[in-house]
Amino acid sequence: MRIVCLPGDGVGPEVMASAREVLAILAPDLELEDHAFGGAAILAAGTPYPDETAAACLAADAVLLGAVGLPQFDAADIRPEQGLLAIREGLDVYANLRPARLGAVDLLVVRELVGGLYFGEKGTRADGTVFDTLEYHPDQVERIARRGFEIARGRRRRVCSVDKANVLETSRMWRRVVTEVAADYPDVELEHVLVDTAAMRLVTDPERFDVILTENTFGDILSDEASAITGGIGLAASASLTDDGPGIFEPVHGSAPDIAGRGIANPAAMLRSAALMLEHGLGRRAEAQRLEAAVDEALERARTADLGGHATMAEMTAAVLEAIGR
């Protein structure tokens, strides 16, 4: 199977190297190839998502992404983050999965990823008013809802659909379509919750959640909140899936340019993203479970600075490899 690796910027190439080292032992038959993406691609080719990279991604079995973002492009017209929107739209990876686990907490945010506010019409009017448009088609809501209910069937069979139906027309349509889809899954419990209430419950009672189903912007915020209550974004992985084509698997932590090159980045989120790739992208659940278990074990013995420890990235990676070898 062919994996396109997009190391990207900041600590991205470093944590990607960790993932490569682990996958070489755990799944040596995989073919991994690097391509330019993000700020590195802007510097090399003038665009964050070059045509050559896009073609490679479309032909791959899965895409493993490091991180994007460089401070020098923060106020530029062409920014590394534009590559993220382009690759998500280009591969139509509409279903973003963000697991969060710690002790009794075991939840999964299923976020619609290629619609809503981030992809709607935007601009500036003559009087200086700036606008971003939030819009969804019912078909977009139906397919993410079905994905969420299917996933819930393999978990604890509970879906919490999050919206803002007391204010937004898009949310009222969202709630209606999700309710219609739920009729096809009588074995799965559905609860509708307003986004502000959901945010509060995530802090006060996160154990109550199984699958959180929501739209793009709400999912962006709630998944980071869920990560914060289960150890921080240094541990947070994600999978972005489509119905027929390669998925994108990436850590959530960003490029962290302040610690790039120092060898102290936490590779756990990148390795957990590789585990999601093995399971959801390649159908290799046994290897995924081995990697997840190895990361969990390594975190008990080799904590990096973001978790209050002193382990380097190399030491953390070595601890994972040692756990895999047992």
Image (tube, rainbow, N blue to C red):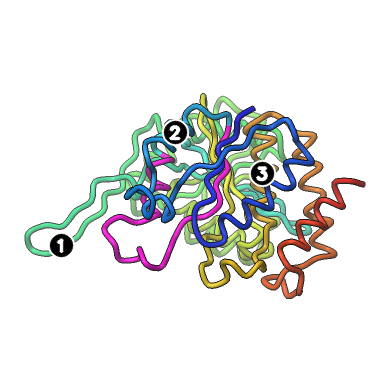
Could you tell which of marks 1 and 3 lies nearer the N-terminus?
Answer: 1
The location of residue 14, given as percent across then percent down, is: 62, 57
Classify 317 as above or below 35: below
The residue that label 1 is drawn on is 129
**Distance (Cα) linking label 3 and label 2:** 18 Å
Pick whichever, 178 or 29, lies toward us: 29
The residue carrying pointer 3 sits among few (fewer than 14), some (14 to 19) or many (20 or more) residues within 10 Å by Cα, namely many
Give the amino acid at mark 3.
Ala
Relative side of 263 to 250, left or right: right
- Indicate the quadrant where residue 279 lies: top right
The location of residue 223, given as percent across then percent down, is: 55, 55
Classify 43 as above or below 279: below
The residue that label 3 is drawn on is 274
Do labels 1 and 3 touch, CB within 8 Å?
Answer: no
Give the amino acid at mark 1.
Thr
Residue depicted at x 58% and y 29%: 61
**Distance (Cα) linking label 1 and label 3:** 43 Å
Of tags 2 and 1, the one toward the viewer is 2
- Indicate the quadrant where residue 104 lies: bottom right
